[in-house]
């Protein structure tokens, strides 16, 4: 009888979690929620954000205040870089997912 827990089949917890996420095909939804969470914490505009969605690696945010939207517009590149940095450091984020990977741009509405 062979031991299924042999050293050659040893996986780290991060590898196991990543495999489960891929097998259950929930990477896109999980990535989307991680992007929304990163937006809320990095932008500081969670209270003014009325809608968010991701399409083709572009984050679209509806902002209720024109003053806040204008301020965010000028800091868009910095916010984008900080969100992508935060996502790339998150072990649950699947970088090579077809639907939602690292962000290319942010559109404020």
Image: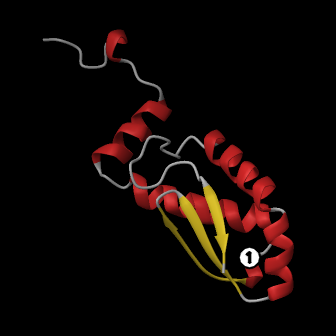
Image height of 45 relative to 105, above or below: below
The residue positioned 49% from the left and 34% from the top of the image is 14
Can residue 13 be seen in this snapshot? yes
Q: Nearer the viewer, residue 100 or 108?
A: 108
Image height of 70 relative to 102, above or below: below
Image height of 1 relative to 11, above or below: above
The residue positioned 77% from the left and 62% from the top of the image is 76
- Residue 35, how many percent across, how many down? 59, 59
Tag 1, which secondary structure? helix
Does residue 2 appear left or right of residue 7 in this picture? Answer: left
Image height of 36 relative to 77, above or below: below
- Residue 75, how many percent across, how many down? 83, 62
Residue farthest left in this picture: 1
- Residue 32, how many percent across, how many down? 51, 61
- Residue identified by numbered label 1: 46
Q: How is the image coloured?
A: secondary structure
Does residue 49 appear left or right of residue 98 in this picture? Answer: right
Which corner quadrant of the image does residue 108 belong to? bottom right
Q: Nearer the viewer, residue 25 or 1?
A: 25
- In the rendered view of the protein, which quadrant contains the N terminus? top left
Which corner quadrant of the image does residue 65 belong to? bottom right
- Residue 70, how many percent across, how many down? 83, 77
Does residue 38 appear left or right of residue 68 in this picture? Answer: left
The residue positioned 84% from the left and 80% from the top of the image is 68
- In the rendered view of the protein, which quadrant contains the C terminus? bottom right
Mark 1 Cα within 10 Å, few/some/many (few <14, many 20+)? Answer: some
């Amino acid at each position: 009888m062979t031991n299924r827990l042999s050293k050659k089949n040893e996986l780290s917890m991060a590898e196991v979690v990543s495999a489960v996420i891929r097998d259950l095909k929930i990477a896109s939804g999980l990535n989307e929620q991680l992007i929304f969470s990163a937006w809320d914490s990095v932008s500081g505009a969670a209270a003014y954000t009325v809608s968010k969605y991701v399409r083709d690696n572009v984050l679209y945010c509806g902002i209720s205040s024109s003053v806040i939207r204008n301020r965010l517009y000028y800091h868009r590149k910095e916010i984008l870089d900080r969100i992508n940095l935060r996502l790339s450091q998150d072990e649950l984020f699947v970088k090579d997912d077809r639907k939602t990977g690292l962000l290319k741009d942010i559109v404020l509405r």
